[in-house]
Image (cartoon, rainbow, N blue to C red):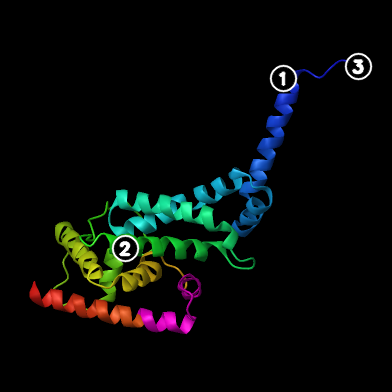
Amino acid sequence: MPATPKSTVLETSNIRESAIQEFATELADEQLVEAYLRERQEKHFEILMRRYERELFTFLRRFLGNAQHAEDVFQGTFLSVHLRIEQFEPGKRFRPWLYAIASNKAIDFMRRNKRHQMASLDSTVQHAESDEAMVSRLSSQGPSPDEQAIRSETNAKVREAVGQLSESTQQLIQLAFYQGLKYADIAEILDIPVGTVKSRVFTAMRKLNEIWMRMQQES
């Protein structure tokens, strides 16, 4: 029997590998973690990283107000995920666990950089809730501005107001409003009851509203 050409063997191997890769991309996050822990194949971890790359970077950029800082924390987050993956508890959901690590990394970064301030973000970046939407949640006085320049200035003031909150309160605002996570997800991320999340969100918005009103009066 003639030997199978090497090119045919290689082609068959590539097809098989492609099929496996395609199947892996359809797995749920938790299944990918389980597969990675079982097989130790980097492709499973890489799929997870690519799956959350844009979403998590957007969250960190909004949180930290700086693209380079966000990139640094993003890399640190996935390094921690890689090192702590065996600590992931079966039955838990991966996304809240990931956000818990990312948000804690962001807070640590902010505490290490005392001079950090919320920076102006590119208007093309998409968020679960825009600065304009956040303005509508806050009390306002005087006529509603309709000029683009004034609207941009108002958005900057919203970010300034959020920046005056404590790191933990900023974290809550980012998760609940800008990232649009459900209270149940936030509760899992912060490891607190859902009722406590609701209470803290209410308190956070009250504090933010007080800051906003004071800024309005001073302007």
Judge left or right: residue 123 versus residue 86: left
Q: Residue furthest right?
A: 1
Q: CA distance from mark 2 to mark 1?
A: 54 Å
- Which residue is tagged 1? 7
Q: Are marks 3 and 1 in contact (CB under 8 Å)?
A: no
Amino acid type shown at disc 2: Ser
Q: How many callouts does the rendering have?
A: 3
**For the residue carrying disc 2, how many other residues have a C-alpha within 10 Å: few (<14), some (14-19), or many (20+)?**
some
Label 2 vs label 1, nearer the camera: 1
Q: Position of residue 123 (x, y in %)?
A: 27, 53
Q: Is residue 173 magenta?
A: no
Q: Magenta region's main secondary structure? A: helix
- Which residue is tagged 3? 1
Q: Residue at x 26, y 73 (%)?
A: 165
Amino acid type shown at disc 3: Met
- In the picture, which quadrant includes the C terminus? bottom left
Q: Is residue 200 magenta?
A: yes
Disc 2 element: loop
Give the mark nearest the N terminus, 2 or 1: 1
Disc 1 element: helix
Q: Residue furthest left?
A: 219
Residue sitting nearer the eye, 47 or 147 = 47
Judge left or right: residue 7 versus residue 33: right
Amino acid type shown at disc 1: Ser
Q: CA distance from mark 3 to mark 2?
A: 68 Å
Q: Position of residue 27 (x, y in %)?
A: 64, 53
- Which residue is tagged 2? 130
179 is higher (above) or lower (below) than 143: above
Identify the magenta region. Answer: 183-201
Q: CA distance from mark 3 to mark 1?
A: 17 Å
Give the mark nearest the N terminus, 3 or 2: 3
